[in-house]
Every structure is written in C-alpha cells, then in structure tokens.
Image (tube, rainbow, N blue to C red):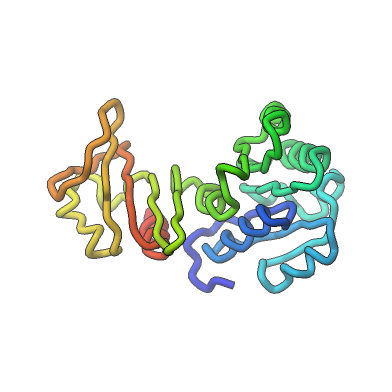
Amino acid sequence: MSKSRLYDDDVLVIGLGRFGGAAALELQRLGHRVLGVEADGALAERFLGKLTRVVQADAADAKIIDTVKARSFNIAVVGIGSSVEASVLASANLVDAGIGSVWAKAMSPEHARILERIGVHNVVRPEADSGRRVAHLVNGRLQDYIEFDDGFAIIRMEPPQETVGFTLEQSQLRSKYGVTVVGVKSPGQDFTYAVPETKVMHGDTLIVAGKIALIEKLAARP
C-alpha cells in the first residue's frame, strides 16, 4: 500500500472484477483509502492486504450499504460486470445513500441509459475507459487522462495555483516537476500550443505530458 498520500478521499469500490479491481488497485496506489466490496468470496480474498479493507457482500442488498457505512464516502465506483440487475441495484443504493460522486460501469448502451436515469453521475463504458483511467479521474483533479504503455501520460487539468498569473517560464513547471505543458485553452478562445511566454490565468485548462509518477505529483498540487 502506498505511503505517499497524493489524494485524501476515501473511495468505495463495488465489484472487484477486471475493471473494478484495476480501479481499486490504482486508487489505492494513488493514496486513497479504498474499501472493496465483492460478492464472490474467492475474488474478495485475492484483494486482502492490497486494499485498505475488503468486505465480502452483495451490494445489491440495500442493507449492505448501511453495513459498510457507504454514506461516509464521497466517491463510489461500481464495477459489477456479471449482472445488469446487480449493477443497477447497487448503483441505485449508492445514489439513494446520497454519495456525491457515483461512477458505474455500463455493459451496453441500454445499461448506460438505465444508470443515467437512476442518477449515476458518471457512466463508464469499458471499451473506452479503463479502470486505471477512471481511478485518475474520480477525484476531479484531472479532467482527462490518457496513459501509454511506457509509463507516459497526457492529461487535461486546471492550472495549479502556483502557475496562475505567471508565464510558463516564470512558473518553471518543467524544472520543478519534470513535465511539459503542451498547450493552454482559455475560456472562449482557441487552443494554443504552449511557449515559455504563455501566461496562465484562472479558468484556463492545461494540457500536460510526462511520466505518470511526475504528473501525479503535479496533479496533487493545490
């Protein structure tokens, strides 16, 4: 488990299959405290010691939501892929519990529409969104995240406070964090490629490229 806490939110992950398991492990690595809930006992056992806590239970049962104190979480990810009914029931239970940000995996367009209608805040299609990618987006610090096989990523993010009102040359993000600001998008204006003289203002969006570990350090800045 990570000793470097980049993120402080506790996250509830329901369903520890390929998608949910990948999201849970990446969230834990990023520094979140992760509670994994999995109905399959053998699968739940595989995550013992890898997540903050693992509970074997069926989250489609509304009573389980109270048992795991789901209302204390601000973020939840539903990765159930074996049953549309179980996914919808678990997601509905989380929405009813008042969790502020519920992410759920959809296995078909029809499934996605149902999840949206019951109030799921973010519906994820696995063919377009991996569990690892979602792990980087759930906390809201990053607006988009694309990871490549060699440990390199490109992200879209709000500018850290230390950059606002300064040019890229003045803020020295590259020398401080080892990442490159590729471009800047200001509200109502076209995207522009970044140069040392580019000034970053509040409300801008930065496109940043670099090694994943370095980008994570930048993203953790206020």
At 70% from the left edge and 49% from the top edge, which residue is drawn?
79
| Residue 30 point in image, percent of width and height | 52, 63
Q: Residue at x 78, y 64 (%)?
A: 44
Instruction: Measuring from the top left, give residue 94's x and y in whole percent.
Output: 73, 42
Q: Quadrant of residue 54?
A: bottom right
Q: How many numbered markers are drawn?
A: 0
Q: Position of residue 41 (x, y in %)?
A: 85, 64
Q: Residue at x 73, y 52 (%)?
A: 14
| Nearer to us in this view, 180 or 68 | 180
Q: Is residue 216 above or below residue 76?
A: below
On-image quarter of the N terminus: bottom right
What residue occupies the far left of the structure in this picture?
197
Query: Horizontally, is 16 left or right of 30 in the view?
Result: right
Q: Is residue 9 left or right of residue 72?
A: left
* Placement of 106 over or under 52, stated as above or below: above
Residue shown at the point (24%, 40%) measured from the top left: 201
Depth check: 73 or 159 in front? 159
- Give percent across and percent down for residue 37: 76, 57
